[in-house]
Image (tube, helix red, strand yellow):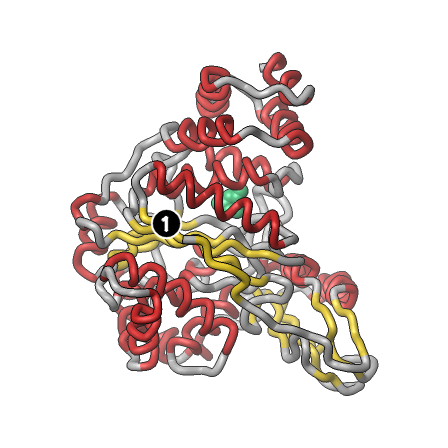
């Protein structure tokens, strides 16, 4: 392995055989974490060629079982977000698309760095089983069109190990590592139709539109070459999505949207992602598919589907009927603004980190999540705030964590005297 690390350190491309050797050795435990993290750090600096990225993706995909969803004919759908702050879209897109005939048989990840993960959010629902036997997963998806579980050890075990290692060695934000991590899981998870939500901005791994486009295009190309219908929505992550950040707070917000709450950015992105998938399974235009998705959301069909889904996986459905029943954090702190002004910019990564500090995320692999912890924004970019007005509400179980979180949050804000904000949400769509 040292030879391969040296090659990558010196900017020389690895062959498919070398990549296969490395992925197999790491999965089997023959290549230790410290060597693999050195390799990942060399990739951060020197990148990978397209051939290396394809080889890495395929080797990670084949490191475990490859699911066969062909029993759902061409109706199987999957979505993936490259990770953002306040991103609860799977909880909404899943029920919308399932209520429109899609089969959302999906495996989701946990939080990574300052970004949240769907599995952590679902575990905020008492009783929800994030792991199902294969037979139950398939039969539930067949019966109600939706089943959502955590990644099993049988699928892409190489990514499971690598993802956890990258999280704690600051080697997440590299295009080839992200492409191979996401697309290996998507290929192994077997869906015919895949939409990617590529986040761009201060809260995303891709900070600028050019790298977001490169990432999106590479993932679309790899998926298509492997016989999948693909599209990628590039969306703004310069400001958190919706108002809630943190696991149960986000589940509550997703339920609120399904019940008709007015959360414009969250609604728009969920409908756009749903429309891409509905257009693929129904073979209609994306415009027509958008209207179908809107009807599913506004008629309550998607909410009914969410209840069916949560109940099928053992979750307490009464929490959906009355979201006040979710366990609450013992410390609730109202952060007030010290001066008048427009919010010119919010650094979403810092806000994600502040939420993480309150207990909503992990700092090491072994950390436990506090499901009730997080932040609810009262103001967002472009809003005017008066001195003394509430800007955010912090939720935590540990008062000591407030001070750091407040400081990080305040650092995330930039004020101006006039409103100069252009709040474009969908930056591009790659089909
Ligand atoms: N999401 C993933 O699944 N993998 C990454 O590397 C980054 C985001």
**Compared with residue 280, is residue 325 higher up or lower down, i.e. above or below?**
below
The image shows a total of numbered marks equal to 1
Q: Report the side of 62 relative to 422 (left or right).
A: left
Please tell me which residue lies in front, 255 or 15. Answer: 15
Q: Position of residue 314 (x, y in %)?
A: 30, 61
* Farthest top residue in view: 3
Give the residue drawn at x 66%, y 40%: 170
Classify mark 1: residues with Cα within 10 Å, few (<14), some (14-19) or many (20+): many
The residue labelled by disc 1 is 230
Q: Position of residue 347 (x, y in %)?
A: 70, 63
Does the residue tagged 1 have its C-beta within 8 Å of any atom of ligand 1?
A: no
Q: Would you say residue 303 is visible in this rendering?
A: no
Give the residue drawn at x 25%, y 49%: 137
SS category of the residue bearing label 1: strand
Q: Report the side of 101 relative to 203 (left or right).
A: left
Please tell me which residue lies in front, 18 or 232. Answer: 232
Say which quadrant the N terminus sits in: top right
Give the residue drawn at x 75%, y 62%: 408
Q: Quadrant of residue 94?
A: bottom left
Q: Would you say residue 117 is visible in this rendering?
A: yes
Q: Report the side of 223 relative to 284 (left or right).
A: right
Q: Quadrant of residue 333?
A: bottom right
Please tell me which residue lies in front, 27 or 126. Answer: 27
Q: Position of residue 429 (x, y in %)?
A: 46, 58
Q: Position of residue 376 (x, y in %)?
A: 60, 73
Give the residue drawn at x 30%, y 35%: 66
**Compared with residue 51, is residue 366 higher up or lower down, i.e. above or below?**
below
């Amino acid at each position: 392995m040292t030879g391969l690390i040296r090659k990558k350190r010196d900017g020389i491309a690895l062959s498919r055989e070398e990549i296969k050797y490395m992925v197999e050795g790491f999965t089997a435990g023959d290549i230790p974490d410290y060597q693999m993290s050195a390799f990942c750090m060399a990739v951060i600096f020197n990148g990978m060629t397209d051939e290396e990225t394809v080889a890495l993706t395929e080797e990670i995909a084949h490191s475990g079982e490859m699911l066969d969803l062909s029993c759902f004919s061409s109706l199987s759908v999957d979505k993936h977000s490259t990770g953002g702050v306040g991103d609860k879209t799977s909880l909404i897109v899943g029920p919308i698309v399932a209520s429109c005939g899609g089969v959302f048989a999906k495996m989701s990840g946990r939080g990574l760095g300052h970004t949240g993960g769907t599995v952590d959010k679902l575990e905020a629902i008492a009783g929800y089983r994030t792991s199902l036997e294969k037979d139950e997963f398939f039969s539930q998806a067949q019966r109600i069109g939706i089943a959502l579980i955590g990644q099993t050890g049988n699928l892409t075990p190489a990514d499971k190990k690598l993802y956890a290692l990258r999280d704690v060695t600051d080697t997440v934000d590299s295009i080839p590592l992200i492409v191979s991590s996401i697309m290996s899981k998507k290929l192994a998870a077997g869906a015919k139709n895949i939409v990617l939500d590529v986040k761009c901005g201060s809260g995303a791994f891709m900070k600028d539109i050019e790298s977001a486009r490169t990432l999106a295009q590479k993932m679309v190309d790899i998926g298509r070459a492997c016989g999948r219908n693909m599209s990628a929505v590039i969306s703004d992550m310069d400001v958190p999505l919706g108002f809630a950040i943190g696991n149960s707070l986000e589940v509550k917000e997703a339920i609120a949207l399904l019940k008709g709450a007015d959360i414009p950015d969250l609604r728009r992105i969920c409908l756009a992602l749903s429309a891409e998938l509905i257009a693929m399974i129904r073979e209609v235009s994306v415009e027509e598919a958008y209207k179908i998705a809107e009807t599913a959301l506004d008629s309550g069909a998607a909410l009914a589907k969410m209840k069916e889904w949560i109940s099928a996986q053992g979750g307490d459905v009464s929490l959906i009927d009355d979201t006040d029943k979710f366990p609450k954090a013992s410390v609730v702190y109202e952060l007030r603004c010290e001066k008048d002004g427009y919010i010119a910019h919010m650094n979403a990564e810092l806000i994600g980190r502040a939420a993480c500090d309150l207990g909503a995320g992990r700092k090491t692999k072994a950390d436990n999540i506090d499901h009730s912890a997080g932040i609810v924004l009262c103001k967002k970019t472009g809003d005017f705030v008066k001195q003394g007005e509430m800007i955010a509400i912090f939720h935590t179980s540990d008062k000591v964590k407030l001070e750091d979180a407040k400081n990080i949050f305040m650092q995330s804000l930039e004020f101006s005297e006039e409103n100069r904000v252009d709040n474009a949400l969908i930056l591009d769509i790659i089909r």
